[in-house]
Amino acid sequence: MVTRAAKFSIQGLHVHYGSLCALRDLNLEIAAHELFTVIGPANSGKSTFLNSLNRLIDLEAHSRVSGGIRLDGIDIRAGLEVEALRRKVGIVFALPLPLPISIYENVVYGLRMQGVRDAKALDAAVERSLRESYLWEEVKDRLRTPAMNLSGGQQQRLCMARILAGQPDVLLFDEPTSGLDPISTARIEETLLVLKEKYTIVLVTNNVAQAARVGDRTAFFLMGEMVEVSATSTMFTTPADSRTSDYITGKFG
Amino acid sequence: MASKRLRKLKEWWIEKAILLSGIFSVVFVALIFLFLLREGLSLFRGESVFDFLLGKSWYPISDPPRFGILPLILGSLLVTLGAAAISVPISLAAALFIAEIAPGRLKEGLKAGIELLAAIPSVVIGFIGMITLGPWIKNLFNIPTGLTALTGSVTLAFMAMPTIVSIAEDAITAVPRQYREAAIAMGATKWQTTWRIVARAARPGMVAAVMLGIGRVIGETMAVMMVTGNAAIIPHSILQPVRTLTATIAAEMGESVQGGAHYAALFAIGIVLFIITFLINGVADLYLHRSRR
């Protein structure tokens, strides 16, 4: 395996909600252009981890974060404006959530917010990001129709396009296929494999098999602790910790 | 078996009872309109519709009487537009503030205050407008009387505000939390999220709120009668006394002879008011459907 520059480096990350500890002493590096998958049962801290990376965690009342996260060597709290961070580190949620506007406007939403007015630039961004999320062919003739009319899988790919339009560095996925049928899921997974050529991807998934299918490396979280992290093929063949093997073979969780 | 039949019977009853209530509400509106038509249309045996709607003088008890309601229509329009211009921006901003920005206790306090404002009887608001706002406007603009269209607009703006604020606030609060999260996650600031996503998603509800507020203003009688001066002349500025359609009915109904021309003319004004309200609701409905599609 080629060593690559660390995109995210996380040191001693703790997250508390009130008195509840949701994430304990996490140390981890995520390489650029890596497809990093996170598995674990409910309440294991994997969504907390994801939300820490783009500081959406700040919106949770009573959350307390300690420890450091660096993106390309820059501290995400001290060195970056939160809005800039969130533009660099896009997130796709579990439930596809188009905004109640047209397909076109959904995609250019972030750009308009940044003040892009040039119609040609916006058109180009729409085509590029819809192609990247493999939605272009299906919607190119109805860009002005409401996004709510799309199917669930299409909506999820639209949400991906919306993030891609802003040309982020990192894509976070929080169980992106949990509400989708198998065919839509397969299409999203294919898309992920193509996208990692350009972006760094962190994928949190409830579906252990999905992590095995697409991940370069996989981390296993349990009750706020990262039990194990290793190359995906290693984890699914010879896990180091017995709790990991119990989880991936379906003995609990 | 018996219990199943019983349940079916219950279902049948509930279904029919709901159907009946629905039919009743439509029937009542239709009956009211028919009654208005029956009483009001007799005016047009001696008077042309054109003279009634566009006549410039309202002298119902002169000889011969003249029933031109143009001054009244313009009076209502002026007061209503003024009230809308004052209350709509303030109310929508207040609704956004309460729903999106105000922290917990302030929010509760404001909501309680707005509800209290809605509970004040219109005659009390009219009274306050008459004894405080009127003299103040008189001194401010140095005009002979403080009972003007502007006074009416300000007074009615206060009456429209609780309606607009509370309905708009409901609409804003009903915007799914995930829209906000999606926008925030894309690097939107709080203000960008509020303005571009929340206000946009809540727009049908906000339009409905504004329409209901305006409906309340047009139909309001007591307060407006107390503060607008009630001169049935065509207004040339908002600093003149005006008389509204509603105030005319309320003020003159007691003096008119039942079945006479004056009496019929007041009912004809009622028809006009009914049609205006109907149109406002229709426009609101059209708009709601268009944005929902």
Image (spheres, grey):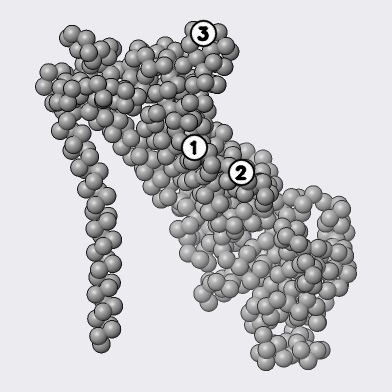
Residue in the foreground of this view, choosing between A141 and B254 = B254
Q: Is residue B198 left or right of residue A174?
A: left
Q: What's the residue type where badge 1 is placed?
A: Ile
- In three-dimensional space, the C-alpha distance between marks 2 and 1, rounded to whole angstroms, equals 16 Å
Chain at tag 1: B
For badge 3, the amino acid type reads: Ile
Amino acid on which disc 2 is placed? Leu
At 63% from the left and 79% from the top, the residue drawn is: A207
Closer to the chain start, of discs 2 and 1, is 2
- Counting residues from the start of the chain, the first of labels 2 and 3 encountered is 2
Q: Identify the element where label 3 is drawn.
A: loop
According to the image, label 3 marks what residue?
B143
Query: In percent of the image, x 67 and y 92: which residue is there?
Result: A251
Residue A176 seen in the current view: yes
Where residue A201 appears, as percent x and y from the top left, is 72, 67
Residue under label 1, please give it: B120
